[in-house]
Image (cartoon, grey):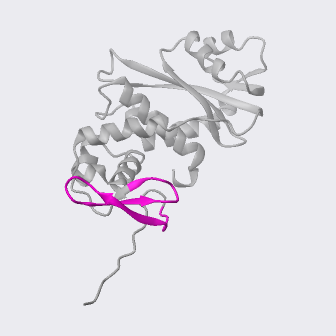
Amino acid sequence: MCEVLTKVNCPHCQGAKVVKNGRKKDGTQNFLCKSCGKQFQQAYRYKGADPKIKHLIVSMLLRNSRIRDIAMVLQVSRVCVLNQLLKQSEKCVLTPKQKHYKSVQIDEFWSYVQHKKKHKRWLFYAYAPETNEVLGYVIGNRSAKTIKKLLQMLKDIEIEQYCTNNWSAFAEVLAGQNHQVGKHLTRHIEGVNNALRARNRRLVRKTTCFSKKDKYHEAAIKIMFQQWNYDYHTF
């Protein structure tokens, strides 16, 4: 009798140090990766539990695909897609690469949740051109209070100069700081705005693709910024 051996790699880390680790209640062989410590199966009866499918869900979310489109293409439920969106966002943490920045640009633009006129959501964020990274962001209304929340997130960073547009609230909040105003000083962050809208339909003003709940809206923005900061070459 000839025995055929199949090499199994971990779908989480692609490691080859994999051993059998018992069986599931339905008799399916379970495996354990000694490199990352995660368990997995070689074949899943429910596609939504497959780590490869979970990875594809996130990749498609970052490539401007709608929730319904992802569910249809990958043959999983919309609930599965939304749950994966939330789980992925929980892992995302924006950590500045430096403690000191020469110049930081701040800008704002709006999107909406459920209803365009009633539920506008303003996204304020700080961008450092010298490292091409988003340092922090806040979602709220268009007010000086929201800007203050953003600056509070940047309090542990030394910033020599802030560049914004000529909205009066910026001048009010940044009084006493080295604050420069002008479109020529915010052209980098304006370019980022365009890239973000191209990658996330929720941020396009004239769109029929929108989140029905704030938690999904914020999660989609969070994983998008994470991708920008740590995997920009694929953005």
In this rendering, position of residue 136 left or right of residue 39: right
Residue 6 place in picture, x, y as percent: 35, 76
Please state which of residues 233 and 192 is positioned toward the viewer in this rendering. Answer: 233
Residue 37 painted magenta: yes
Residue 201 appears in the picture as rendered: no
Residue 222 appears in the picture as rendered: yes
Question: How many labels sit on residues?
Answer: 0
Residue 101 place in picture, x, y as percent: 76, 33
- Identify the residue at image location x=45%, y=36%: 89
Residue 222 painted magenta: no
Magenta stretch bounds: 14-39
Q: Considering the image in quadrants, where does the N terminus appear?
A: bottom left
Please state which of residues 16 and 92 is positioned toward the viewer in this rendering. Answer: 16
Give the answer, above or below, for where 12 lies relative to 177.
Answer: below
- Identify the residue at image location x=33%, y=46%: 65
Please state which of residues 110 and 55 is positioned toward the viewer in this rendering. Answer: 55
Give the answer, above or below, for where 112 lies relative to 224.
Answer: above
- Quadrant assignment, res 53: bottom left
- Quadrant assignment, res 205: top left
- Identify the residue at image location x=44%, y=65%: 18
In this rendering, position of residue 12 left or right of residue 162: left
Please state which of residues 44 and 25 is positioned toward the viewer in this rendering. Answer: 25
In this rendering, position of residue 87 left or right of residue 76: right
Give the answer, above or below, for where 77 lies relative to 37.
Answer: above
Residue 125 place in picture, x, y as percent: 58, 28
Residue 71 place in picture, x, y as percent: 24, 47
